[in-house]
């Protein structure tokens, strides 16, 4: 009961904030930025791999958000809408950096190492972060979108314009690569 | 540290993967970009209401043009164009109007003039208007000035003749106008 009341209250606040943004209120833009910039910056940082590119991408994305918020019909979906714009900007940034997302048949990697026994493997936050950071950009993108941004394989396939099976395979291989990197560091 | 799977571990420690938020310079730059956005907003609004904006603009331009036309007309008044003709005009006007007043004091039956003829006796008839307009267009033209003076004199002569005839028709004791009392 308490949770649903809080949700209702949050929805009202978000509706009001979006409504103010639609009127071009700069204070509302600042409030919206303050509410979402932390999470969105982390997406940019994971996707681009460095602070400078993450800040540039975040800035570009928020400018687009402010300019297009009038088109947002359902204020309730503002989080997903903002996140999608940020992710799209990150993908555009990667494409500008010549990162291509190819079908798995065209990628020259060792086969059959993706399926590994994960039981009893000692994961740590720092080790995973460090390993993801040194992953090839293609693998890092698929892994981030799936495990951190929680998009489905199908959604990722649509975003990257590759098949769903390629996304699944690339994700498994990215995960295996993370494991190998961590093992090598030990 | 042992976990069942990579996914489970990430989900359980999700918050620990988060870094601090962006540097304040990001918002500072966004704020700078938002400032000229206000101008764009005005342009966007003008774009939406372009017909109203165009109508207001046309009205404003028309007002300015009408104001300038009136000012130009004022500058073209006879006083500014030919001061000596303005003096002559004032003299003859006073003389003509005095005689016209006297004529009007006689009964219509005795006057024997229809409305058209009466109108022609008025100072500012069509001939006079044409001459004055010509002089404004050609301020230095002596022929027009001479024609205007001639016009005034002819009109005075005509009015004097009418008055003379009226006096002959009606004895002085019967009708005495202000003009007659003065002379």
Image (spheres, rainbow, N blue to C red):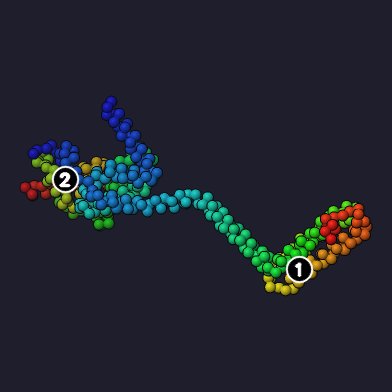
In this picture, residue A9 sits left or right of residue B85: left
Of marks 2 and 1, the one in the foreground: 1
Counting from the top left corner in percent of width and height, residue B123 is at 78, 61
Q: Residue furthest left?
A: A186
Counting from the top left corner in percent of width and height, residue B119 is at 81, 57
In this picture, residue B118 sits left or right of residue B55: right
Image point (11%, 42%), residue name: A123
Image point (19%, 43%), residue name: B18
Q: How many marks?
A: 2
> Residue under circle 1?
B148
In this picture, residue B128 sits left or right of residue A70: right
Distance between the alpha carbons at the discs numbered 2 and 1: 109 Å
Do the residues bearing badges 2 and 1 touch, measured as CB atoms within 8 Å? no
The quadrant of the picture occupied by the N terminus of chain B is top left
Q: Residue furthest top?
A: A1
- In the rendered view, would you say A120 is above or below A93? above
Chain at numbered mark 1 = B
Image point (33%, 40%), residue name: A78
In this picture, residue B116 sits left or right of residue B15: right
The quadrant of the picture occupied by the C terminus of chain B is bottom right
Answer whether residue B149 is visible to the viewer in this image: yes
> Residue under circle 2?
A175
- Do the residues indicated by labels 2 and 1 lie within the same chain of the protein? no
* Secondary structure of the residue carrying numbered label 1: helix
Chain at numbered mark 2 = A
């Amino acid at each position: 009961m308490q949770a649903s009341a809080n949700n209702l209250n949050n929805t009202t606040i978000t509706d009001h904030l979006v409504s103010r943004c639609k009127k071009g209120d700069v204070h509302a833009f600042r409030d919206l930025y303050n509410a979402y910039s932390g999470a969105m910056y982390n997406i940019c940082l994971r996707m681009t791999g460095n602070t400078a590119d993450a800040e540039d991408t975040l800035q570009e994305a928020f400018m687009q958000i402010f300019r297009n918020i009038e088109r947002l019909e359902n204020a309730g979906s503002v989080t997903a809408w903002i996140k999608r714009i940020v992710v799209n900007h990150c993908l555009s940034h990667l494409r500008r950096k010549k990162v291509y997302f190819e079908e798995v048949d065209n990628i020259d990697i060792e086969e059959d190492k993706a399926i590994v026994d994960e039981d009893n493997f000692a994961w740590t936050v720092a080790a995973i972060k460090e390993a993801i950071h040194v992953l090839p950009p293609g693998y890092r993108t698929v892994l981030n979108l799936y495990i951190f941004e929680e998009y489905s394989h199908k959604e990722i396939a649509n975003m990257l314009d590759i098949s769903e099976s390629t996304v699944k395979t690339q994700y498994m291989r990215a995960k295996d690569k993370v494991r190998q990197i961590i093992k090598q560091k030990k | 540290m042992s976990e069942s799977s990579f996914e489970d571990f990430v989900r359980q420690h999700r918050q620990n993967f988060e870094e601090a938020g962006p540097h304040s310079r990001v918002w500072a730059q966004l704020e700078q970009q938002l400032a000229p956005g206000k101008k764009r907003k005005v342009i966007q609004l003008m774009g939406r209401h372009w017909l109203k904006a165009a109508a207001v603009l046309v009205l404003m331009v028309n007002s300015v043009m009408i104001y300038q036309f009136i000012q130009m007309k004022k500058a073209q008044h006879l006083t500014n164009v030919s001061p000596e003709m303005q003096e002559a005009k004032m003299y003859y006007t006073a003389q003509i109007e005095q005689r016209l007043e006297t004529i009007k004091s006689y009964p219509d039956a005795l006057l024997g003039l229809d409305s058209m003829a009466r109108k022609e006796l008025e100072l500012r008839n069509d001939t006079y208007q044409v001459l004055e307009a010509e002089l404004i267009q050609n301020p230095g033209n002596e022929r027009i000035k001479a024609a205007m003076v001639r016009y005034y004199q002819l009109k005075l002569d005509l009015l004097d003749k009418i008055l003379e005839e009226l006096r002959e028709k009606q004895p002085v004791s019967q009708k005495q106008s202000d003009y007659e009392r003065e002379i």
